[in-house]
Image (spheres, helix red, strand yellow):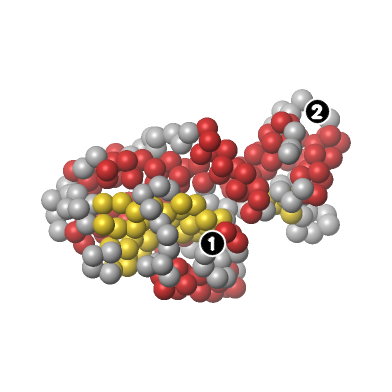
Amino acid sequence: MIAERQKLILEAIIKEYIDSAQPVSSKLLEKEHDFDVCPATIRNDMQSLTELGYLHQPHTSAGRVPTDKAYRFFVDNLLEQGVLEFEDIFDIETILHEGNQDTLKFASSLLKCLAETSSSLAVMHLFGKDFIWKEGWEELLKEPEFSQKDFVHSFTNFLKGFENSIQELEIDSDLRIFIGKENPISRANDFSVISSRCYFPDNEEAMLALLGPKRMDYNRNISLMNSLIKLLADF
């Protein structure tokens, strides 16, 4: 169990790291956030969070980065508080209202919009056609992690494993969120998946998923996926 102030500090570190992809220092927290405590207390809380497994220090002189445990804590809090409706869902609503087009054209339009809005790789599996579609490489490769060749190689291996196992994944109509080592796919320690089953307007069953680094914007992407699934259910 962590103290209330430590929760606030942990949440601030996660948000800062999601935004910057850089280890977060106590100096940055002191500058950007008002915790109403002295710098030494912030440092002590960060050390406690590290010892509890919520933070990792890549190098002795570096700041801290969130661990899988921290991201899970953050996501569980989001879900417990209730996921807000995605504010800018207009483009997706437009695609849905044009759902009289053929399934593949509809799927392509929806997936492109999902990928662009989430800055993640959007993956769709049409169960009836046993067809897998991917969109979003251009957006995904802009993320700083993908400047490293090893990271790109790891992600492509993870994606292959995800595609090969897609029939066996126990994904239902509720959002499923796999973070790092939680993934049922091997070699997925650096990545997260947000996924759900859904039905298109022609009653075609599909699975939608967002794949990206663990540093993905969970607040935005969970809200986006949740709102999209609700919209699809109403059509």
Residue 183 numbered mark, or none: 1
Q: Can you say which quadrant of the picture contains the C terminus?
A: top left
Query: Image height check: is 151 above or below 219?
Result: below
Q: Callout 2: helix, strand or loop?
A: loop
Q: Residue at x 42, y 54 (%)?
A: 195
Q: Callout 1: helix, strand or loop?
A: loop
Report which residue position mark 2 lands on.
37
Please report contact status of discs 1 and 2: CB closer than 8 Å, yes or no. Answer: no
Q: How far, Cα to Cα, is label 1 from label 2?
A: 38 Å
Q: Residue at x 46, y 36 (%)?
A: 83
**Quarter where residue 25 is shown:** top right
Indicate left or right for 234 with 49 as reference: left
State the image coordinates of residue 159 (x, y, percent, origin top left).
46, 69
Q: Residue at x 48, y 63 (%)?
A: 141
Query: Image height check: is 156 above or below 182?
Result: below
**Residue 152 visible from this viewpoint:** no
Q: Amino acid at mark 2?
A: Val
**Residue 171 visible from this viewpoint:** yes
